Amino acid sequence: METVVLVIGANGQLGSVLTKALQKKFGLERVIASDLKSINAFHGIFEVIDATNESKIEEIVTRYKVTQIYHLAAILSAKGEETPLKTWDINMKTLFNVLEVSRKNNIDKVFFPSSIAVFGEGAQAINTPNDAYLDPATVYGISKAAGENWAQYYFLRYGLDVRSLRYPGVIGFQSLPGGGTTDYAVDIYHKAVCEEEFDCFLDKNTTLPMIFMDDVIRATISLMDAPKNDITIRTSYNIAGTSFSPAEIVHEIRKLYPGFKVKYNPDFRQEIAARWPKSIDDSAATKDWGWKPKFDLERITVTMIQKLQEKYKTGSKNLEALLF
Ligand code: VAH
């Protein structure tokens, strides 16, 4: 049967880029983008889906004969702390709906994004191993750790081929993030290109694992293309891009914008970040399906600045309007 992909959460920071990559790979007619509302961001097929509604997901899966589901809808770490129980409900209910619809409709493969937010102070902070103790301190992290175990359960109990990656902080120029603790690392480039001062909500020396969007897309598709028997980890794979602190990203930016101004005003997100790893051991992903990142901080910075200069050249600082 031909591959037909449903992307849930296609309007998000990752979903908006991954959807276009999947359309390029499979063709416009074989990818169904979906989210809570249509924002006319995509060529091709778009369906409005509230992923808390299982029957709506099943209706679309049946109508288009979907064979793969990428479940990218979730409330992220910082935003999630505003309404903990609602975050838990939404992050888990949507996952259960995807897993149940996939099980009942013999979906070939399901992608579930996890995060380095599943780690807490109980894990070694440097080169955190894949099998480190998980003691997440945010509801988002708790929901991702639980989700990983549910993914493994559906594989072991029902044979559902669910695959997962623990994303570091994702940095990209194509979309604006929302509600993440690592989002400073996207906003800072926009401020630099617009020659505005940047107000950083993390301490200057807070090192976090980060990854460039191109590496994220390549890792995700590589994982999903890997032969089923090569996947030895059914909770979630660590992947690493590069690690850096706000001070280090500022240093790189000032190579291109010497006058770039920054002030540091750590807020509640500093406490979240302080419990996360500083660097990640992704040797299992390398061994099982050949993972290797291509973007370090210097290459991320040059690429982000170049792409954002192109976008802002149109004279509009309302990048959101430019993105879609
Ligand atoms: C967040 N960008 O900040 C997400 C990510 C590792 C962090 O999961 O919540």
Image (cartoon, rainbow, N blue to C red):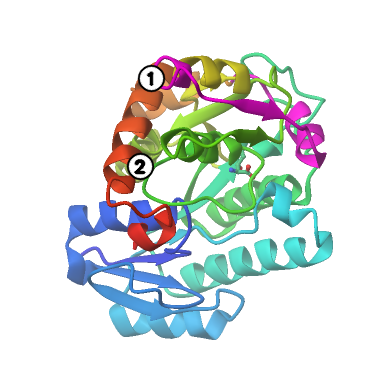
Residue drawn at (72%, 45%) of the image: 141
For residue 132, above or below residue 309: above
* Mark 1 crowd level (few <14, some 14–19, many ≥20, 10 Å Cα): some
Range shown magenta: 253-279
Q: Residue 190 got which mark? A: none
Foreground disc of the pair 2, 1: 1
Q: Which mark is residue 217?
A: 2
The answer to whether residue 177 is above or below residue 118 is below
Q: Nearer the viewer, residue 18 or 162?
A: 18
Q: Earlier in the sequence, mark 2 or mark 1?
A: 2
How would you rate the neighbour count of disc 2 (Cα within 10 Å): few for under 14, some for 14-19, many for 20 or more? some
Residue at 44 percent of width and 51 percent of height:
14
- Quick check: 131 left or right of 187? right
Query: Quick one: 12 or 117, which is closer to the camera?
Result: 12
CB within 8 Å, label 2 to label 1: no
Q: CA distance from mark 2 to mark 1?
A: 27 Å
Amino acid type shown at disc 1: Leu
Task: Judge by depth and name the residue closer to the eye, 24 or 184.
Answer: 184
Where does the C terminus fall, quadrant-wise? Answer: bottom left
The spot of residue 30 in percent (x, y) is 22, 68
Badge 1 is on which residue?
256
The quarter of the image holding the N terminus is: bottom left
Q: Amino acid at mark 2?
A: Ile
